[in-house]
Image (cartoon, helix red, strand yellow):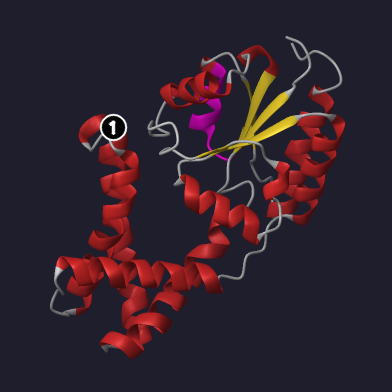
Amino acid sequence: MGPIEVLFVDKGGVLIDNNDLSPQWRRLIGEFLAPRLGGSPEAWGAANIPAFEQQLERWRSAMAGRGPADIRGFFAKDARLWFLEMCDAIGLQRPPDEEAERIAADTVSYVKAHLELRPPQGGLRALRALRARGLVLHVASADAHDELVAFLEQIGVRDLFDRVYGSDLVNTWKFGPEYYRAVLADSGVDPQLAAVVDDSPSAVSWARECGMRGFLVERQNGEGFDNAVTRTLSEVARATSWPVR
């Protein structure tokens, strides 16, 4: 294998610490919905836990081929179901679907606008250094394309990435090597010159199955998120200088 020329970067677990976002989501959901629909902010925050678990199960089913082929449409409709399941959890009568869809969209918009995002600053500097070295950077995430673009703009790094691959952009769930095959086909990248940075051992394994190299963001004992990301990207930097065997 020659030096890496193209790097596909995951969002959650690489560009942002997922463990940092969950408590904020619960607090902000309650902050938005309680004054508008009643109930306490704490009740709404707690209701998000089972609703989110059910949302994840729908994602898993869809990724396993038991869901709709139109992934963009799936993302659009699933927020409504998530909101309705929170209503069930706190005992609120379900509003009509059209109203529920609007409230769900407004809730998500409010949360995203008020999240305190703390991306790994050392990791971002490492990505900028890789870009300056000549690497082409793409995002490769399971999230929706439009949401990924908004996130990158919010943390000030949209300029680092050429293509922003969400599952909907290639209409392929990130649930196996098929996702990376779709991304490679769309980008025209030679897998022998490409690598993936991800916090999922499965995703790294799928990338390697497609002939790419994979770098796993995995925290060592007592290691902070930023240090783990920066350390992993230093491994990528070394692999851009000489063949990795």
Coordinates of residue 53 in the picture (x, y in percent): 31, 56
Coordinates of residue 136 in the picture (x, y in percent): 72, 30
Q: Is residue 160 left or right of residue 170?
A: right
Report helix, strand or loop for mark 1. Answer: helix
Say which of 185 and 232 sits in front: 185
Quarter the C terminus occupies: top right
Coordinates of residue 211 in the picture (x, y in percent): 58, 13
Magenta stretch mostly in which secondary structure? helix
Give the residue at x 25% y 30%: 65
Say which of 205 and 70 sits in front: 70
Image position of 239 with respect to 63: above or below: above
Give the residue at x 29% y 46%: 74
Give the residue at x 69% y 16%: 193
Coordinates of residue 170 in the picture (x, y in percent): 43, 31
Q: Which residues are magenta?
A: 199-208
Q: Is residue 160 left or right of residue 144?
A: right
